[in-house]
Image (cartoon, rainbow, N blue to C red):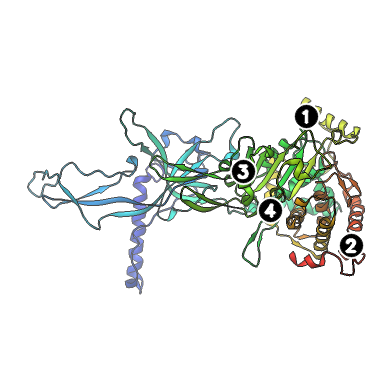
Amino acid sequence: APSPVREPSRALPLFEEAIRAVQRSVMAAHEDGHFMSVKPSVHARLYRLPHCTELRKLNVSSLRADDSNCLIQVPGTVIRTGQLKMLQLSREYECAKCKFRHTVRAELEERHQMSLPAECTASGGTGKPCGGTKFELVDGSEECHDYQEVRIQEQVHRLLVGSIPRSITLLLQDDLIDACKPGDDITVVGTLRKRWRPLSRGNRPDAELAIDALHVHVHNDEVGSARVSRELGAEFEAWWRARREAGMPLKARDEIVAMACPSLAGMYLVKLGLLLTLIGGVSHTDASSMRVRGESHLLLVGDAGTGKSALLRHAARLSPRSVLTTGIGATSAGLTCTAIREPGGEWMLEAGALVLADGGVCAIDEFDSIREHDRGAIHEAMEQQTLSVAKAGLVCKLRTKCSVFAACNPKGKGYDHDRSISVNTGLPSPLLSRFDVVLLLLDKSRAGGGRSEEHDRDVAQHILREACGEEGPPPEPDAATWPLEKMRAYVEFVRGSFRPSVTPPAQRAIVAYYSHQRQADTTSEARTTIRLLESAVRLAQAHARLMFREEVTLLDAIYVIVVLESSTLHSRLAGGSICALTSMFDETPDATYPLLRDKILDSLGIDAEGRPLRQEGGGGYPGERLGGYM
């Protein structure tokens, strides 16, 4: 019997004929068999091939000519999808002389072209061929199938530095059409085939490789916790249980935060904001059937040399799927999608950075370098998480369910504290309001203030320690030292395992903060829209996930307020200046939290239960009218 691995073109038709035979036997034995019919277009879909390098390829670049006509499994990202077509696999022609019918089949290697026989070879019982050269098509003899061509390339986040992503064409038929769309991460099982390019005078014949797909599995809809083993999930639960029994939940959280981008010293608020944005909140659908996004966006605004690019790269490495790009030279087509015309005249859509990052992170460095008319193309992608396309007669909607991490420098010579953040960055208010977290990373000497010698000394020692390969101070007993893979698994686990609900005290604190920001005279109008309230809810849910909890408490709301206040250098709520760049980790956060909580609640005018400490204008506390929003 032919091997389905080495000879799939011979083995798979036998499998399909066996399936049709089973259908006929079921019909014969069933009491309602006269109401049934045999489905001739059935396929044997093979998947989960054995773990060996000959069958499971790491990427498209691993395919070789020796793999042709063999069964393979390869992962990739869909970058282009073609239109649906009707493919004729066979048809019959009748000889005008002897009336013999010839079956002509389409050859995949010749791009499904059909060639008429040169002459009739039927003998007709005389022992001599007919020799007729005229043939007529037999009506109703065509065997047609649905057909679509898809282009996949190597996954961008798995590419090595300097390597160019390779791509290959997938051939989808029947039930596999529309199984994937641009931006999907898929694993395909199929037969590697050769296809000859169309012949033309003066050019040598050339063949390209294509995969005749048997099975397509899309990974985008997989829950993050499903990609983490049960043993690792149980290890996370035991780790948090031990910390809570010791009464140090915030100390445990700071251990996890400190493991984010360990090459940078300190920067407690920046790393906390990065993890909260990466984890994100809970998406939901409102009463009008409109989806409210759960993914958060982060903008880093700072001077040169403050570690913005390093933070973006680390955020991309913590995500299972990421695209890292720069704003210099980026166009709207490169960020969203572009229409490409194939040699046959057919138009196809090719995915851009935001579409390829669907389900992950899109990190954009030098965000302010994007041209203004190109920057407006990402408004819909950031808020509605979709991308409406109308190009070259192709009208569709693509999914861009990703978190945007962006970094930019202040305009001019430096950050001007007398102007709003929108003027300092050159970003319009509609775009700036879409970022959940905006962090200012400013050199305090350039900001017009003194610098902390202790902080400078710590940073210098950290950099020299990294450069000289010296070991740092010994970690505390039972301190978390997770590698990058385990840190990535933790982020995936908490995102897929917890859907925190907001408790009433946390709701009142968030609404009170939103009302306080709306009434303040010094806050930027771009940061005090209704999106601020949505951002606070998402970040509070992310903090609860980070703390391994199923509900958002007042503690989560307090720390979210601190992170949101980091977008300003002088915070009235925190009682002084906040510098995200020089913020250091507290050695006793669990003991310090009650002081921080009381200071922020007193500034908001509420108690620990979220009730107002004083009446304002006889109309109750200002957040009561907005309480139903959450």
* Mark 3 Cα shell of 10 Å, populated few (<14), some (14-19), many (≥20): few
Q: Toward which corner of the image does residue 203 lie, by quadrant? A: top left
Q: Is residue 487 left or right of residue 340?
A: right
Q: Amino acid at mark 3?
A: His
Q: Is residue 457 above or below residue 332?
A: above
SS for tag 3? helix
State which mark lies toward you, 2 or 3: 3
Circles 2 and 4, Cβ within 8 Å, touching? The answer is no
- If you read the primary sequence from the N terminus, does the residue marked by circle 3 or circle 4 appear first? 3
Q: Amino acid at mark 1?
A: Glu
- If you read the primary sequence from the N terminus, does the residue marked by circle 1 or circle 4 appear first? 1
Q: Position of residue 365 (x, y in %)?
A: 68, 38
State which mark lies toward you, 3 or 4: 3
Q: Is residue 618 above or below residue 75?
A: below
Q: Can you identify the residue that label 3 sits on? A: 373
Q: Amino acid at mark 2?
A: Ile
Q: Can you identify the residue that label 1 sits on? A: 466
Residue visible at 87% across and 53% down in the picture: 247
Between the C-alphas of marks 1 and 4, the distance is 32 Å
Q: Position of residue 609 (x, y in %)?
A: 87, 64
Res. 520 visible in picture: yes
Q: Amino acid at mark 4?
A: Arg
Q: Can you identify the residue that label 4 sits on? A: 495
- If you read the primary sequence from the N terminus, does the residue marked by circle 1 or circle 2 appear first? 1
Q: Nearer the viewer, residue 385 or 94?
A: 385
**Rendered-image quadrant of the C terminus:** bottom right
Q: Position of residue 7 (x, y in %)?
A: 37, 43
